Amino acid sequence: MSVPASELKAFRADVSAWLADNKPADPGFLLPQSFMEVGSEQQLDFLREWQHKLWSAGYLGMAWPKEYGGQGVAGAFQKVADQEMARHNVPICFNTIGLNWVGPMILDIGSDAERAKYLKGILSGEDIWCQGFSEPDHGSDLGSAQTRAVRDGDEYVVNGSKIWTTLGNFAKYMILLARTTPNTERKYDGLSFFLAPMQIPGVDAHPIRKITGEYGFNQMFFTDARIPADCMMGDEGDGWRIAMKTLEYERGVSAGQAGGLWMIRVLADDAISQLQGHTRDGEPVLADPMARDRLVQIIMEEKALQLGQKRAGISALTTDYPFSLPISGKYRGTEFTRRLRQLAVALQGGDGALYVGDEDVREGGFWQRAYFNAFSATIGGGTTQVQANIIGEHVLGLPK
Amino acid sequence: MTRSVVGSVAMDFSDEQAMLLDVAREFCRDKSPMDVVRANLETETGYDAAVWQEMIDLGWSGIALPESVGGSGLGVGAVVPVVEAMGRALLGTPLLNTTLAGQLLLRAGGTQAEPWLAKIAAGMPATVAHLESADWGSESCFATVDGNGVIDGKKCFVGDAGVAEIFVVVVSAAGKPALAIVTREQLAANAVQMNTLIDLTKRSGKVDFSGVTVAADAVITGANVVSALRDFRLLGALLVAAESGGAAASCLDTVVDYLKTRKQFGKLIGSYQALKHPTVDILCAVDNTRSFVYHAATLITDEPLSEDAEVACRMAKAQATDTIEYAGDRAVQFHGGIGFTWDCDAQLFIRRAQWVRQAFGDAIHHRKRLANSLLDQFL
């Protein structure tokens, strides 16, 4: 669906005006910088209300069908809405796993019954979703998952543990990758995929304290947890395929996400403006030749990412390795973010050693927190190093 | 109110550019396979005159020049895909320098330059003689032309000095920047001393213009000269970046081929992450170069370059330089012992990288100027 530019422009003005009117006031407590940092009930309530408000106004899931709570319009509208949310610096949309990974996956390959059951609750924020892929002994190596699901009548009995489970302590559902057949020839073939209820006996969430000092991740323990057999997506053994499909949405390779900010947006502009008025060697830090060189490099990195998105849409300029730009998006984008935030702290002089809670820390410790939080993206969803393998193997055709 | 440091992210690619890219890639692949590149390394001119003639017949010497002088009127943006394709095949020829000389004359000279532009469009090799030292950042000019049209001065790093028929010499006339147009037959015997370049696919030399007398209509003065010289340097940076981007892409292909075929310790070496991951970084750098190059190509017009275009050209060159330096360096290393030999193509790329780095300013040169454009607003 292509949308006339004039229509998008008018929409942009509408959503911008709405956001200006409805952006929540500072709640007076620390807000999560991404969906992976929701640590308290207080934060959860606040963000849930905000997501519900966004959805009620029609600015979430815009490209999803109306019958499932969407607006049934072109994805271009959601893109504009997301851009405006970033520009207005509004709070994040906490239910990202549902909105942007599970939802589009269910829309894509789920049954009508699954769509009817799950999609609307994702958009409204009523149903919180988490992802049960990584395990304590197998972070990025999903194929080796050992959590067992054993069929028993109309149920599967689940035992094992998942880790880095964002929102696991609040979630109603989990996309669960579990082994239904041990000892298959290919380890991938023994995996199955469940849309599993979480608020049942035998499921325990243990919050994990992170490098920021805050919470948001959990280790999940399954002890004879019984989940209905009809929670399985596809058939036994389809787990790997469905998990990979989900990762396409998580990594932004496929479109169809419901939208909303999943992480606060920090750009080179922000890193530069926070340095204004500060000195290095007695001169403005922004006049320091070495600092300037590093800042120009980071600006170029940001610009190259944006230009890459443009070029990805020009097929005559992507003939060498047609998928290199989309497939490398996570690799490049998350590493850029980490480097930018690191640089922002590095150029603070002594203040770079302060942290959240110190009365002199800049912007409440925003940059230090933001730098540490950047690792959640360079590690989660397949580490940078795994991404490099994927790009090497799938784009360049290098051997495994 | 400051503007976003990222600024313009415009990128358009016309059907004409796409067609030129297709044609040029096929042409260069066809005319410049590696054995031909190698055969040309130690020849006097560095290229095959018949291939250059074919390029002229295809209209490439006049792509960027107006139709009024026999060109195609497509602007420098349309030369970019051609030069990129040449870089990919390490194909020499005077096209890059001839194009730049044409741009400098066009931008500085207006109608006065038309007779020269017509010759350039028709395929007469031309070059710009501007540097007087190894310092690409210096804007001082000691070469002069006096009231009688007599030039005094030497220039260095004059591209294609051995074959150029037209030399656009940057001089000062009565203390103001000017261009003197010198033809090959006006040069004294032994006026040209060719360099031994690190990149054997390139040619340049020192040229002594002292004593050459040019007619009044061969001296271009006036207000446009200064902005034309600025644009010339930026366009030079862009075209070298485009050519270098093509070469880096080709270098990447060479590395990938080797990583897919060479076995050590019982495994294809491309399976080792110590080689795989840096190769992915070469890919990303090649991608970034291409994005900057075509972004800049989008912003170039025949008018004096905008501030956005300046930023784009500088970023393209800064990125292209770092990219090919890394790609060429790693190409040698990843080929192991064979990479250290003359017969391995990695040497062509590492040598190209050393040439690219300095041409029209290295990465630090451009980042320093980008910092002025982008960061001074925050001071």
Image (tube, helix red, strand yellow):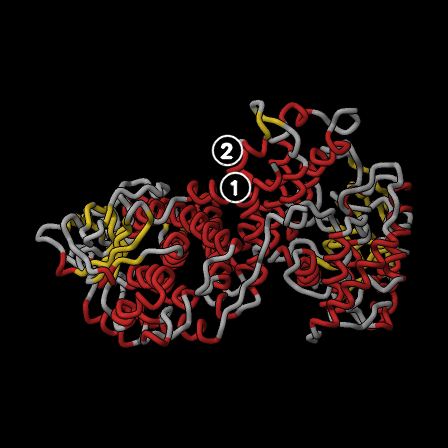
Q: Tell me the SS state at disc 1.
A: helix
Camera-nearest residue between A165 and B163: B163
Q: Quick one: quadrant of the C terminus of chain B? A: top right
Whether residue A93 is visible: yes
Marks 1 and 2 close (CB-CB < 8 Å): yes
Give the residue type that dot 1 points to. Ala
Residue shown at 63%/39% (left/top)? Answer: A272
Q: In terms of image quadrants, where is residue B20?
A: bottom left
Q: CA distance from mark 1 to mark 2?
A: 9 Å
Residue farthest toward the front in the current orientation of the protein: B147
Tell me where residue B135 appears, x and y as whole percent.
32, 40
Q: Residues within 10 Å of mark 2 (few under 14, many from 20)?
A: few
Name the residue beneath numbered marker 2.
Answer: A289
**Chain of the residue under the numbered disc 2 shown in the image:** A
Q: Is residue A5 above or below residue A323?
A: below
Camera-nearest residue between B78 and B199: B78
Residue shown at 22%/63% (left/top)? Answer: B36
Residue farthest toward the left in the current orientation of the protein: B189
Camera-nearest residue between A275 and A233: A275
**Chain of the residue under the numbered disc 1 shown in the image:** B
Horizontal side of B301 relative to A52 (left or right) equals: left
Name the residue beneath numbered marker 1.
Answer: B371
Residue shown at 51%/57% (left/top)? Answer: B306
Same chain for the residues under marks 1 and 2 in the image:
no
Residue shown at 23%/64% (left/top)? Answer: B125
Tell me where residue B346 appears, x and y as whole percent.
31, 51
Give the residue type that dot 2 points to. Pro
Q: Tell me the SS state at disc 2.
A: helix
Horizontal side of B71 relative to A34 (left or right) equals: left
Q: Residues within 10 Å of mark 1 (few under 14, many from 20)?
A: many
Whether residue B244 is visible: no
Tell me where residue B335 appears, x and y as whole percent.
33, 48
